[in-house]
Amino acid sequence: MPQCEMCGTEEASLTTTKVEGAELELCSSCTDFGTEVRDESTSSGGGKYSTSSSTGKSSSSSGSSGSSGSGSSGGSTRPRDMFDDMDEIATDYDEVIRDARESRGLSQEELADQLNEKASLIRKLERGDTLPTDEVQRKLERALDVSLVEGQSADDADWETDDPGTMTLGDVVKRKD
């Protein structure tokens, strides 16, 4: 029996609902949190959201995905995009840069000269006011012998599972009550 992707309730039929920009398969009590997504075949023309890219087209053209689709259309894999290949910058990148610079006895101006960048950029990076571009990130990592990429944390490991039906939004969302 399919599970609601928000609360985990098992229900015979789930409704595809758009919540905060994400399409989820939700039970009848959770559909109030979003807008129901209608299939093009059931709606008479321009509905609020189009679901053509997430229904028939992707599942019929990707025969190598290996998914056993015995349930709803929510089991299809999403297409890869440019963000899948990008590394996430560490949340404490500003402290990492400052600590590495200070441990080498360099001033902000000296580090900027070494990197052929402006000292104001180094100040902004160390305050956390701006994120480094890919080029500046590589320069900093080489010059200071540090990594500014977010390592896989224990929280990330919780998301990795062989069974796609074990985690729901209800398992990870922290409510503000």
Image (tube, grey):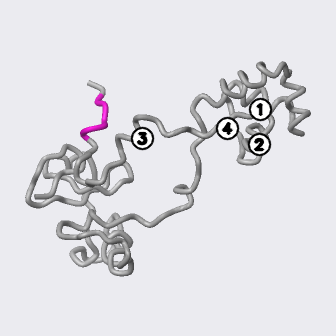
Q: Is residue 137 above or below residue 83?
A: above
Q: Residue at x 56, y 56 (%)?
A: 85
Residue labelled with disc 4: 131
Q: On the rendered image, what quadrant is the C terminus found in?
A: top left
Which residue bears the numbered disc 1? 144
Instruction: Report the residue at 26% width, 71% height from top.
Output: 39
Dot 3 alpha-carbon crowd within 10 angstroms: few under 14, some 14 to 19, many 20 or more: few
Q: Residue 136 carries which label?
A: 2
Is label 2 in a helix, a strand or a loop?
A: helix
* Circle 1 residues within 10 Å: few <14, some 14–19, many ≥20: some
Q: Where is residue 165 in the image (x, y as percent from the top left)?
A: 23, 53
The residue located at (67%, 27%) in the rendering is 96
Horizontal and vertical percent for residue 139?
79, 42
Q: Is residue 31 left or right of residue 115?
A: left
- Residue 140 lies in the magenta-colored region: no
Dot 3: element: helix
**Mark closer to the chain start, 2 or 1:** 2
| Tag 1 secondary structure | helix
Q: In which quarter of the image is the N terminus?
A: bottom left
Measuring 31% from the left and 72% from the top, which residue is drawn there? 55
Q: How crowded is mark 2: few (under 14 residues within 10 Å), some or many (20 or more)?
A: some
In front: mark 3 or mark 2?
3
Farthest residue in the left direction? 12
* Label 1 close to label 3 by CB (< 8 Å): no
Q: What stretch is highlighted in magenta?
A: 170-175
Q: Is residue 131 left or right of residue 64?
A: right
Q: How far apart are marks 2 and 1 (CA)?
A: 12 Å
* Image coordinates for residue 117, horizontal then vertical, percent: 86, 38
Q: Name the amino acid type tagged 4.
A: Leu
Q: Which mark is residue 156?
A: 3
